[in-house]
Amino acid sequence: MRTTVDIQNEIMKLKKERDVCILAHTYQTQDILEVADFTGDSFALSKFATEVPQKTVIMCGVRFMAETAKILSPEKKVILSHPEAGCPMAEQLTAEELRTLRKKYPECAVVAYINTTAALKCECDVCVTSASALEVVKKLPQKDILFIPDCNLGSWLEKQIPDKNFHFINGGCPVHMQITPDEVDAARKLHPDALVLVHPECIKEVTEKADYAGSTTGIIKFAEKSDAKSFIIGTDTSVVQHLQFANPTKKFYPLSKQCVCKDMKLTTLVDVLDCIKGEAGEEIELSDEVIKKARISIDRMLG
């Protein structure tokens, strides 16, 4: 029977022989992160894809991430590690529905979270990540903002940018949204010395109780740089494991054991190996028109 190390060694060997780059989102399991060329948040992975010399990129994440990588690197072959790995939040709004909303709010700048489909990126004015949203939205000349699809990230922005008028749809991440204020209280009672770090995709009643709210990368950096010795992590529970590996002198606890992205966990280590062999995954194909239109909103984010 093969062991995890056996499979990892085969992946490391084959990816060099076949000139393949492996990108792994932070919500992937530790065994996959260990064979990746780069790990991080969704947009950081896509930017990294533009910088690597390899012409084939395997995106260990979900579909919108692979689409974004293809938009930024249309000349490269981008493989989604598991064809069924989608994002419920990214699929909550269609391009046609957004065009209808534009007519309803003609004065608004349409700001789309990066967690959206390529089709939606074609219809918005600018994309943002959870890390860049505050800075990007502040700089927009428009006073009125239609923020899609996550109303929780949007309300977090609204609180910090009171001089703008926000409009939302009833969307968001079903995994982060299920974390409750009661769970924050219970976690603090169990670990009174720990700081609570949460993702702004959580409902506002949770972010208001946290010591820090920020992107997954922001949470990781905060925990690593902080003088505190224990932390309660309010995002996908895999981040707890990754932080434990990287910071053995500190303690990390999940805020909610229910906070697990099932789509992210579809990809297995064997899937990654089979992708390199050409026996698994799905190549992402987008039309030149979609790539051109979607790229505009991303370039605007980058300034």
Image (spheres, helix red, strand yellow):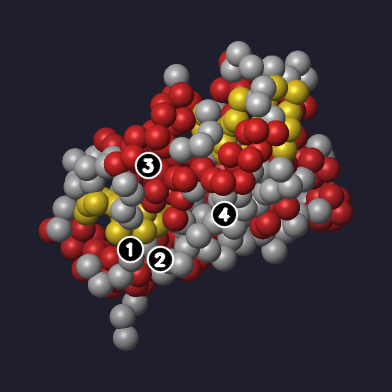
Question: Which amino acid does the dot numbered 2 rest on?
Answer: Pro
Q: How dense is the environment of label 1, judged by Cα within 10 Å: few (below 14), some, or many (20 and up)?
A: some
**Can the viewer see residue 249?**
no
Q: Alpha-carbon distance for marks 4 and 3?
A: 17 Å
Q: Alpha-carbon distance for marks 4 and 2?
A: 15 Å
| Front residue (pair 156, 89) | 89
Q: Secondary structure at mark 4?
A: loop
Q: Alpha-carbon distance for marks 3 and 1?
A: 18 Å
User: Is 246 displayed left or right of 50 in the figure?
Assistant: right
Q: Position of residue 94 (x, y in %)?
A: 57, 50
| Residue receiving disc 3 | 290
Mark 4 or mark 2, earlier in chain: 2
Tell me the number on the disc at residue 83: 2
Mark 3 or mark 1, earlier in chain: 1
| Residue receiving disc 1 | 282
Q: Alpha-carbon distance for marks 4 and 1?
A: 18 Å
Q: Say if mark 3 contacts mark 1, CB within 8 Å.
A: no
Question: Which amino acid does the dot numbered 4 rest on?
Answer: Glu
Give the residue at the far bottom of this rendering: 1
Q: Alpha-carbon distance for marks 1 and 2?
A: 6 Å
Q: Residue at x 29, y 41 (%)?
A: 288
Report which quarter residue 135 is drawn in: top right
Q: Say if mark 1 contacts mark 2, CB within 8 Å.
A: yes
| Residue receiving disc 4 | 91
Q: Residue at x 61, y 49 (%)?
A: 93
